[in-house]
Image: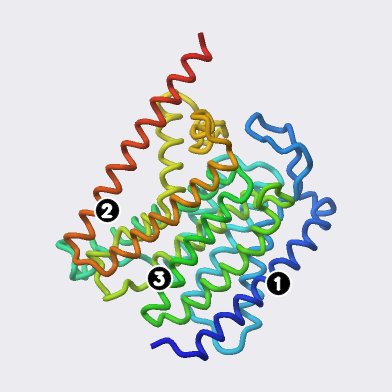
Amino acid sequence: MITSIQIADIFRILLGSLTVALSLAFISIRLAPRLKLIDHPGTADHKLHKEPMPLTGGLVLVLTITAILFLAPGEIDRDILSVVAASWIILTFGLWDDYYHLPPWGKLLGQLLAAILLISLDVKVRIFTSPEFILGSETALGEGLNIVITLVWMIVLTNAFNLIDSMDGLAVGLGALATLFFLVITLSVNQMELVHFCTIVVGALAGIFFYNSHPARLFLGDSGAQSIGFCLGAVAILYTPIGGSQLSSWFVPILIFAIPLFDLFLVVISRMRRGKKIHKASRDHTYHRLAALGIPIERSVLLMHGSSLILSLVGYLCLSLNYVMANTIFLVVLLLGMLTFLYLEKNYQHNVSEREK
């Protein structure tokens, strides 16, 4: 049962996080030129902005999370502390990339180091050692598979948010929506340490969104987009499903993060098919393809936010269903996603062929 004191604590944390994020964002915009954290227009074909933009979103996010956690009274949960420690590795490598444009292996190295630190501090998936799964058992094989899945999950989600961060407010909005749903889920099972962490992240992202929404006055940069993906990937590992059933909940994070994951696989598979480098930025993301269908990019962003909201609601609904019905719904959503993928890819290939003619 949620108490009025708990609700009051959540609102206090939210207000504090929002205030700190807004303040840090305001200060960072003015300090960015001195720090040389600026994204200049015209440095790449896919960049559409016309004015120099501060790349300080990552600093604002991680500093806000760290400040609120350490300023709040009481002891910090060990798992949450592990996530914050690992996120500083992501921030450091992200800032390094924003300054010097790291090669792909340099970005991957930072993500691997952060994920390995997280696993070493015992924050990892436990699917293959859960008795609910057919192969679930406390064996070295099960533990090894858990570690591999954790590494893959953290790296994939970190890159999904990094890749999709090319339009004002898109990645921040998707991150805020996802965090809000995890806040509701964790609140339902009284997982208060994670509730408070999600509240801090929501407040921080809301403050950043104020400056990052169209027309943006601040960019996330690689440091910010990767930090969002990494922190939320860890939250998805730590949350406890309503009713405790993993059979009805293992795919819920996939639905909550469906839009950035969809965009990641759409872009990677499309570039591989065309023989393009998967890490080289291009105008082939979901919102570019929607724009080619006649939907303005700003509306495409709203459409993607709305789709994320609907899919997250579907995921939340599945938590209260039996595992047969829940997994059937997930398969239907997966099928619809595949059909959307094929349609967007076919239309994009047609447009490419027309331009080549």
Q: Is residue 274 above or below residue 49?
A: above
Answer left or right for 268 relative to 92: left
Which amino acid is tagged 2? Answer: Phe
Answer left or right for 188 relative to 250: right
Q: Position of residue 17 (x, y in %)?
A: 64, 73
Identify the image's colour scheme: rainbow, by chain, secondary structure or one colour.
rainbow
Give the secondary structure at mark 2. Answer: helix
Residue bearing mark 3 = 238
Q: Which mark is residue 243?
A: none
Q: Which mark is residue 20?
A: 1
Q: Which mark is residue 330?
A: 2
Label whose residue precedes the other's in the sequence (1 or 3): 1
Marks 3 and 2: in contact by CB < 8 Å?
A: no
Q: Name the residue located 56 percent from the left edge and 42 percent from the top edge.
A: 299
Tell which tag, 2 or 3, sits nearer the viewer.
Answer: 2
Marks 2/3: CA–CA distance = 21 Å
Q: Position of residue 35 (x, y in %)?
A: 80, 54
Mark 2 closeness class: few <14, some 14–19, many ≥20 residues within 10 Å: many
Q: Name the residue located 24 percent from the left edge and 54 percent from the top edge.
A: 329
Which amino acid is tagged 3? Answer: Leu
Asked whether the viewer can see residue 329, the reply is yes
Q: Is 90 or 335 nearer to us in this picture?
A: 335
Label whose residue precedes the other's in the sequence (1 or 2): 1
Q: Is 122 or 239 nearer to us in this picture?
A: 239
